[in-house]
Image: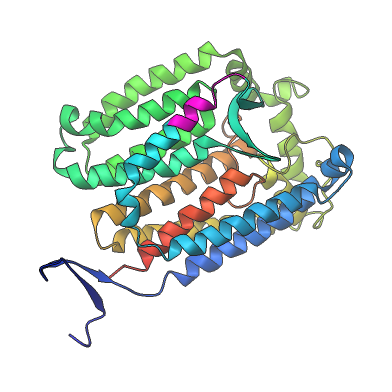
């Protein structure tokens, strides 16, 4: 018993409930996260300095705010890393209900802040939060809890798949009322990955996927701006000043960067050419300033981060831990793939930020909290 690395958890009568293997957290994952965060802070300043100086008279405006959120996020990451991930299981339902409440509140005229045509933010003093970002993490925790308790029913369409998808569809519906199609898509795809990994039948997903494609087409047709984005994506150079403006400017940043780039801080597209260079299109600035080598280095770091997340999911001591790790890793992977695909012109513009690099307080904070949960799961792997 003295040489056993496990910590035994007993109930009040001394009966063995579970055995947790406590090791040090995944140091490589922590190092990768901090490296990406450092790159992100550097690139946020480089991409936003011109815009901040012209609009706010302070070239450090965006960097200061991002540094504040990074400090809060890192503090929360280390705090969450020390909390046993089973703790979140008890609060899963309360957390999700709270997020639903915020998603409703943000829709009230005069309460929700409208940016980019979407009422997705709540103002808190000089800052704002995006409830949909919190909802993604809350839904991952809730779904991990629910599936781990009802996995035997997951092969049943009525008893397993539908009950698992109901909270997902409710959250998606509330987010689409804002509307924020990009975030809603990330949320749904993340949860679908979790349900599939847990053992749902492929034929059920085929049936649901067919309905989803019809709904997807309906959502595009129902909003003229989505049709505009789609037509602009198909041939952005046909109308580079309007429909294809964002994609063409992004490609004009990525292409000239070449192998080594123009050098840190030497971007040309950030001079009011490329829209949102510090948020949605920050990878374009990375490619322009650091070139193919710099962009590849960032992508390698992302691949290493996802690899560590997958390993943690495989080695987690229970199904709840596995699904938590799958959900968090899947969420990060989906956002990376969508953002990179958008800036390289592979899919229409969605408004999804690049994890750890893009400017945005809610997104950065929640990503770091998610990594904290993942690090705690790694702390209990066998």
Q: Which residue is drawn at 86% across and 47% down?
A: 58
59 versus 281 height, above or below: below
Any part of residue 344 in sight: no
Q: Quadrant of residue 92?
A: top left
Q: Nearer the viewer, residue 274 or 85?
A: 85
22 versus 220 height, above or below: below
Q: Nearer the viewer, residue 177 or 334?
A: 177
Where is residue 373? Give x, y as percent: 42, 57
Where is residue 73? Give x, y as percent: 57, 56
Any part of residue 294 in sight: yes
Q: Which of 201 and 292 is in front in this view?
A: 201
Q: Which residue is drawn at 64% across and 44% down?
A: 360
Quadrant occupied by the N terminus: bottom left
220 versus 101 height, above or below: above
Q: Which residue is drawn at 39% across and 21% down?
A: 213
Quadrant occupied by the C terminus: bottom left
Q: Which residue is drawn at 83% across and 36% down?
A: 272
Magenta segment boundaries in residue numbering: 101-109
Asked whether 108 falls inside the magenta stretch, the response is: yes
Q: Hey, which residue is sitting farthest front in the picture?
A: 12
């Amino acid at each position: 018993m003295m040489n056993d690395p496990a910590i035994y958890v007993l109930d009040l009568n001394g009966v063995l409930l579970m055995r947790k293997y406590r090791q040090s957290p995944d140091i490589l994952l922590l190092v990768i996260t901090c490296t990406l965060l450092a790159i992100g802070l550097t690139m946020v300043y480089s991409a936003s300095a011109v815009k901040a100086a012209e609009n706010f008279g302070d070239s450090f405006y965006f960097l200061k705010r991002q540094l504040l959120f990074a400090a809060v996020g890192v503090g929360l990451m280390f705090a969450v890393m020390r909390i046993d991930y089973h703790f979140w299981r008890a609060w899963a339902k309360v957390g999700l209900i709270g997020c639903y409440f915020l998603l409703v509140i943000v829709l009230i005229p005069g309460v929700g802040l409208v940016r980019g045509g979407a009422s997705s933010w709540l103002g808190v003093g000089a800052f704002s939060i995006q409830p949909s970002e919190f909802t993604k993490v809350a839904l991952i925790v809730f779904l991990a809890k629910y599936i781990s308790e009802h996995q035997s029913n997951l092969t049943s369409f009525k008893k397993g798949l539908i009950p698992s998808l109901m909270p997902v569809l409710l959250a998606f519906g509330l987010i689409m009322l804002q509307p924020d199609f990009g975030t809603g898509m990330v949320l749904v795809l993340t949860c679908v990955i979790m349900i599939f990994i847990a053992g749902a039948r492929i034929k059920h997903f085929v049936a649901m996927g067919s309905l989803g494609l019809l709904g997807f087409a309906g959502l595009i047709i129902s909003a003229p701006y989505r049709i505009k984005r789609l037509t602009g994506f198909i041939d952005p150079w046909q109308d580079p000043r309007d429909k294809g403006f964002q994609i063409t400017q992004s490609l004009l940043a990525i292409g000239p960067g070449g192998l080594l780039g123009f050098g840190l801080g030497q971007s040309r597209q950030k001079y009011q050419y490329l829209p949102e260079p510090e948020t949605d299109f920050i990878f374009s600035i990375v490619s322009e300033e650091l070139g193919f080598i710099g962009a590849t280095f960032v992508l390698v770091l992302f691949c290493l981060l996802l690899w560590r997340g997958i390993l943690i999911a495989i080695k987690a001591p229970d199904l709840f831990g596995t699904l938590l790790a799958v959900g968090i890793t899947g969420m990060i992977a989906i956002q990376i793939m969508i953002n990179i695909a958008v800036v390289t012109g592979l899919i229409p513009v969605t408004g999804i930020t690049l994890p750890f690099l893009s400017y945005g307080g809610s997104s950065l904070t929640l990503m770091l909290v998610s990594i904290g949960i993942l690090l705690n799961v790694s702390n209990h792997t066998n």
